[in-house]
Image (cartoon, grey):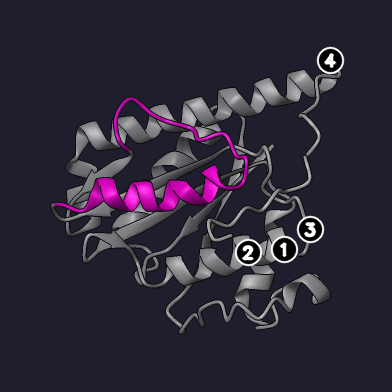
Amino acid sequence: MKVLLLNGSPHKEGCTYTALQEIADELKKNGISSEIYYIGIDAIRPCMACGGCSKLGKCVIDDEVNDFVNKAAEFDGFVFGSPVHYASASGVIVPFLDRVFYSASVSGRPIFRHKPGAAVVSARRAGTTFSLDQLNKYFQISEMPVVSGRYWNMVHGVTPEQVRQDKEGMQNLRILAKNMAYLLKCREAATKEGILPPEAEKMEKTNFIR
């Protein structure tokens, strides 16, 4: 079983990475392997709403978004990490995830359905709860169980050293990792017993204008 951790910070080994690494270390202790995927600092083009992914089976913008979608298919769980910028998730991770989830969904690839996901954010001070809610919506629209900890999944600090001093925040991330490992093992046990996820229903789209 493998968990893919997404680093949506411009800083490759900053505060967000520190939070994700704490989760990765705890997952390893619980027998779950993981990998941290760094989006990088190159510009991420937003979704063009062209619908081309439904024909190509991937996003028409051929960049790291398609690479991530292909990699994600091999993983059993996900953790998305982001710093808080202007009281919301980073300008790197939002367009990235918009295109990841839309292209995967429209192209009919059930890469994320029923796989557990969790969001973590890092901030100097505030904006954390909104950013968590923003990231959690990607899971909630994709039929993904949302894994929780004992508190909101956030850490505070300006540097990795300060984040490590956030004892409560770091403890909560370890609890989150344990809960993720537990849920993955439950899913594996259920599959062995023939307990499978429900079949997907055909989507009914309803507008509010008649």
Magenta stretch: residue 87 in it?
A: no
- The image shows residue 75 at horizontal and vertical percentages of 69, 47
Residue 148 located within the stretch drawn in magenta: yes
Give left or right: position of 173 versus 158: right
Bounds of the magenta segment: 126-152
Q: Which residue is mark 2?
A: 102
Could you tell me how far apart the alpha carbons at marks 3 and 4 are, in whole angstroms? 27 Å
Badge 2 vs badge 4, beta-carbon distance below 8 Å: no
Residue labelled with disc 1: 106
- The residue under label 4 is 193
Of the pair 197 and 183, the residue shown nearer to us:
197
Disc nearest the viewer among 1 and 4: 1
Vertical relation: 121 (above or below) 116: below
The residue that label 3 is drawn on is 108
136 sits to left or right of 19: right
Give the secondary structure at mark 3: loop
Type of amino acid at the residue the image marks with label 4: Glu
As displayed, is residue 96 above or below residue 186? Answer: below
